[in-house]
Structures are given as C-alpha cells and as structure tokens.
Image (spheres, rainbow, N blue to C red):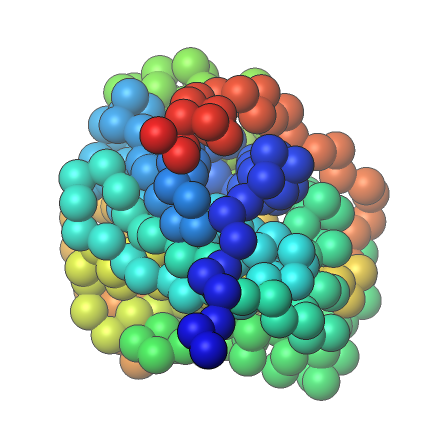
Amino acid sequence: MTAAAPAALTTEQIGFLARAVSRAPSVHNSQPWQLRVRGTEVDLTVGHGVELRRQDPFGRDRLLSCGAALTDLELAVRALGRDCHVEYRDEEDVVATVTIGRPRPASTRDFALYHAITRRRSHRRAFFHSRVPEGVRTAVAAAGEATGVHVVEPGRLGKLAELLGFATRVLRDDRGYQRELELWTAHTHGWNAVGDGVPEDAPDEVVLAGRLAAENLLVVCTDTDTRPDHLAAGAALQRIWLTATAKALVGSVITQPLHLTGFRARLASELALPGVPQAIFRYGYPAVPAAPSPRLPLGELVPDGPAGGRR
C-alpha cells in the first residue's frame, strides 16, 4: 500500500512559518526576503529592491540575512512537527527551497532554538562584565559548525584590534557610506553590528584591544566564497545566535569591515583562520535590555498569500 503524500500547508501553518522568518536578523533590518508557498514546497526568495551599494556592494550581507531567515524557516517547520529538506538554489531570486515532509516530532534542541527566535535581540552596547563559562562558549560555537563552515574563537586580539581600528577610520571617513547609513538607521552608539555602522568614538588600538579582550568573539568562516557559502554562513550565524539566546546571552554581528578591499584576506592571514571570514559575532550577558527591531507586515512577507502558492 502506497503511503499518503505529505499534507499541504494550511493558512494557519503558513502564518506560523512567516512569523518565524520575519524575526530573523538582517543587514540594516532590511528584511530582504519573501516566501513563496507551493503546496509542500516553500521558496525563500531574495528581494533585489534592497540595495546597499556602500555597505553591501556584492550582496553578501543580503545572502547572509537570507541564510538566517532560512534557519528560522527550517526550525518553524520542525516545530510544526513536520520533517523537511533544505536545498540551496542558484536561481536569480530563489535562494533556497524547503520541502516539507511527513509528520515527525521535533527534537528538544530544535524546540529550544525555535522558542529563542522571538527572544533574540541585537545587542550593540557593552556587555555585563562577567565572562561566559567555557562550556557555554563551546556549545555556542559548536552550534554553527556545518559542512564547509567553521567557527573559531579568534586569537591575536591585538592584531584584530589593529585591523578593526583601521576599518573604523576608513568607514568613518567614507562620506558615501555614512550617507547610506543615515538613510537606513537611527543614531546608535557603541559597537558596529549588522546595519549599525562603526563605533562613534573610533577608539585607538590599545583601547579597542581591551574591549575585545573583555568580550566573547567568534569568526564564521567558509571553505570557499560562493553564494551557497554566504547562505550557509548566515544559517550558521543564526544557529549560533539562537543557541546563545537560549542560554540567556545576547549578541550582534560585525560585517562592515569585511567589505573593505583586501580586509578579509588580511584577517584570514593575520589570525590564521581556517577559511574565508564571512562575519564576526560578539556576545555576552546583557548589561541592559535590548528592544526588538520593527518588522514588516506578514502580508509583505508572503505577498501571494496561501491561495496564491497553490495555483
């Protein structure tokens, strides 16, 4: 007897998935994605109307953002009690397709990460002065490990401070970058995170090295530098971030310096990284609460609606 085909998603289930995807982090909170539902297949598409010519000249951060959204989508499907398969796509607008399978209970870990989605915040200020225990740091880093993706705690913080200090000065003096930044963000203070520019006070390398030493840092690297690598790095970043959130930690992502010509090659060489650096994640215990970022209406996330996906 042939087994029944997996059931198509209901309107309520599509809304459930859309809410999870809407909470993913993105460059300048641009939320450059949409969902296209086709029965038991969900396409994650990237919107090309969001252009950040100075912040993201090659669209790498946009793909990192879509990778983070893809992690949220997969976790939401599993939280619904359904199996799924994720396939990266090389079409112009479709970055990945999630094929939803038969009922399958979600693991305890997947449930924990799913429930962390709404609690995740971008924390751009200083952290509480308490070192994250080694076991927790190990678990957070391990959450991002995947085929072709490597997560490392950087050494040589003095050299990292030197490189970031240089990038800070270059970006601060780039008028085109600063104009673009003003169009997308409100006035912020402290560290640069995804979409938040550079530190206002532009500290010297000694001060910056001291700050780095007091924080917990991870560098997400990939074996190569293709579109699937960027998606995989974004997916890994979100797993790292949600794992940190589930352990009462907060964090933010640094990507702007990595767009400067030659910066990533220099960073990989100076820090002996195991691949191409795609992002730096900083995390710790929050000194003050962080407010959630505004989100687009769900109708813009699934523009065709459930019915449109089944035509």
Q: Tell me if 290 is positioned left or right of 103 in this view.
A: right
Say above or below: 52 vs 71: above
Residue in the image at 23% along x and 37% along y: 93
Q: Which corner quadrant of the image does residue 219 belong to?
A: bottom left
Residue 127 visible, this angle: no
Please say if 202 is above or below 79: above
- Left or right: where 173 falls relative to 242: left
**Quick check: can you spot residue 93?**
yes
Q: Judge by depth and name the residue closer to the eye, 184 or 182.
A: 184
Q: Residue at x 32, y 36 (%)?
A: 46
On the image, the x and y values in percent for residue 72 come to 55, 52
State whether residue 34 is above or below residue 257. Answer: above
Quarter where residue 17 is shown: top right
Which image quadrant is residue 216 in? bottom right
Q: Looking at the image, which residue is at 19% across and 69% down?
A: 224
Q: Residue furthest front?
A: 1
Asked whether, in this view, residue 296 is left or right of residue 164, the answer is right
Q: Residue at x 63, y 25 (%)?
A: 294
Image coordinates of residue 242 in percent, x first then y, are: 64, 59
Compared to 162, does 56 lie above or below?
A: above
- Front residue of 181 and 249: 249
Q: Position of residue 115 (x, y in %)?
A: 74, 55
Quick one: quadrant of the C terminus? top left
Where residue 248 sits in the image (x, y, percent)? 80, 60
How many labels, in total?
0
Q: Nearer the viewer, residue 218 or 90?
A: 90
